[in-house]
Image (tube, rainbow, N blue to C red):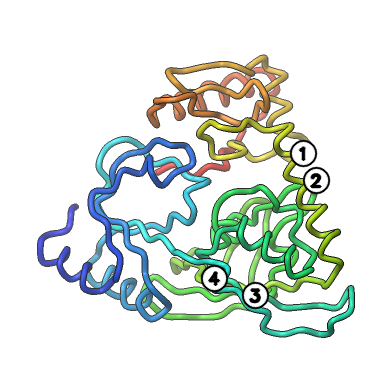
C-alpha cells in the first residue's frame, strides 16, 4: 500500500534526504529496474533510528539496498521505502592500533554506506593489508558484510571484528564477531531471523604492511578481474552462488550456455556466471534468462543453482 500525504510529509521531515518515485535503473549496477515509492538516505545513526521506529509504527514496507550491486528490482511500482546509506573515506578511522611496525594489527572503523572500492583504496594508501582480495568488487561495505562477500578463497568476515547494527524498531546495537554467523555469501546477525536487523558499520582488524606492496597486490587483483569478467555492461557480478565443490560458471559453460540471450539479457561470453544487460534489458529478461540457465544446468549436471543476486 502506498503512503498517504500525511505519511509522506512525516517521512520528509524525519529524513534529510528523501527521493520520490525513484527509477531503480539509476541505482542498480544492472541498469534496469522498477519504480520505488521513496528512497531515504538517513544522515546518521539517530536519524536512522527515528526512521526505523516510524516505519515500524506506520507499518510501511522497507528494504536496504546498499550500493545496488547485488540486486534486481522487478518491473512495476514498489510501495514503501528503500533505505540507502551514504558514506565516504572521511568516515573511516583507525580506532585502535597495536603498533606501527609491519605485521602489527590495526582496527579500522567504517560506515556501512562507504564504497567498498574506496575502503580498499584507503587501506592500501595507509599500508593496511587483509582486504586486497576485495579490490575491484563494487558495492558498499554494508552490503559486502551482509553477503559475506569474497573472492580468491577469502571472505570479508575473516577480518571483521565487530558490527554496529539496528533493529527494525530503531534500537541501535553492537555485536562482536563471536555473536555473528558467517556462511558462504551470507552473514547472520544476533537475533535473526526473529528480528529484522540492518548493518550500519563495522570494525575490521587489518595488519600493517608496506603500502606499495598492498597497492601492487590490489592492482594485480583488479587486472585479473578485468581479464576474466565482462566490462562496460550492466551486471550484478557473479549471478549464482558456487555449489559445494564446484563453480557455477563451469557448470553453465559445460551446458553450452555462454552467449545465450533472452531479450536484451545475455549470459556473458567472457564469464558464464555473469548475466549482463546488453542495453535496454528489462528485469523480466534477466529473470527469464536466469530461470532458463537454472533449468538447463539442472538437466545437464543435476545441480540446481542458487542465485546470489537478491530479486524483489
**CA distance for labels 2 and 1:** 6 Å
**Residue at the spot of label 3:** 203
Front position in the image: 47 or 122: 122
**Residue at the spot of label 2:** 220
Q: Judge from the rendering whether residue 289 lies leftward or rightward of residue 80; answer left or right.
A: right
Which SS class for mark 2?
Answer: helix
**CA distance for labels 2 and 3:** 26 Å
**CA distance for labels 2 and 4:** 26 Å
Q: Residues within 10 Å of mark 1 (few under 14, many from 20)?
A: few
Label annotation for residue 168: none
Q: Quadrant of residue 238?
A: top right
Mark 3 and mark 4 in contact? Answer it, CB < 8 Å: no
**Residue at the spot of label 4:** 111
Q: Judge from the rendering whether residue 167 lies leftward or rightward of residue 174; answer left or right.
A: left
Name which of mark 1 and mark 3 comes first in the sequence. 3
**CA distance for labels 3 and 4:** 9 Å
**Residue at the spot of label 1:** 224
| Above or below 116: residue 30 | above
Which percent across, then down, holds residue 171?
42, 80
Residue at (12% x, 59% y) in the render: 4
Amino acid at each position: 500500500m502506498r503512503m498517504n500525504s500525511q505519511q509522506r510529509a512525516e517521512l520528509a521531515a524525519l529524513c534529510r534526504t528523501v527521493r520520490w518515485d525513484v527509477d531503480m535503473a539509476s541505482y542498480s549496477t544492472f541498469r534496469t529496474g522498477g519504480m520505488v515509492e521513496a528512497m531515504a538516505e538517513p544522515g546518521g545513526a539517530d536519524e536512522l533510528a527515528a526512521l526505523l521506529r516510524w516505519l515500524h509504527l506506520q507499518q510501511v514496507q522497507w528494504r536496504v539496498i546498499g550500493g545496488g550491486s547485488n540486486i534486481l528490482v522487478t518491473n512495476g511500482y514498489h510501495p514503501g521505502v528503500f533505505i540507502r546509506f551514504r558514506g565516504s573515506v572521511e568516515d573511516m578511522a583507525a580506532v585502535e592500533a597495536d603498533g606501527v611496525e609491519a605485521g602489527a594489527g590495526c582496527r579500522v572503523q567504517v560506515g556501512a554506506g562507504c564504497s567498498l572500492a574506496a575502503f580498499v583504496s584507503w587501506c592500501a594508501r595507509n599500508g593496511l593489508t587483509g582486504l586486497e582480495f576485495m579490490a575491484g568488487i563494487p558495492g558498499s561495505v554494508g552490503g559486502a558484510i551482509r553477503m559475506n562477500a569474497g573472492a580468491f578463497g577469502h571472505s570479508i568476515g575473516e577480518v571483521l571484528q565487530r558490527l554496529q547494527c539496528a533493529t527494525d524498531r530503531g534500537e541501535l546495537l553492537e555485536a562482536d564477531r563471536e555473536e555473528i554467523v558467517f556462511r558462504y555469501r551470507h552473514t547472520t546477525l544476533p537475533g535473526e531471523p526473529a528480528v529484522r536487523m540492518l548493518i550500519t558499520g563495522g570494525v575490521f582488524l587489518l595488519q600493517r604492511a608496506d603500502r606499495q606492496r598492498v597497492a601492487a597486490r590490489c592492482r594485480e587483483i583488479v587486472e585479473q578481474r578485468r581479464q576474466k569478467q565482462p566490462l562496460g555492461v550492466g551486471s550484478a557480478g557473479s549471478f549464482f552462488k558456487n555449489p559445494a565443490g564446484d563453480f557455477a560458471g563451469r557448470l553453465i559453460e559445460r551446458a553450452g550456455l555462454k552467449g545465450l540471450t533472452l531479450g536484451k539479457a545475455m549470459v556473458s561470453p567472457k564469464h558464464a556466471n555473469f548475466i549482463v544487460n546488453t542495453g535496454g534489458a528489462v528485469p523480466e529478461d534477466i529473470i527469464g534468462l536466469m530461470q532458463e540457465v537454472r533449468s538447463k544446468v539442472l538437466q545437464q549436471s543435476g545441480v540446481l543453482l542458487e542465485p546470489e543476486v537478491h530479486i524483489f
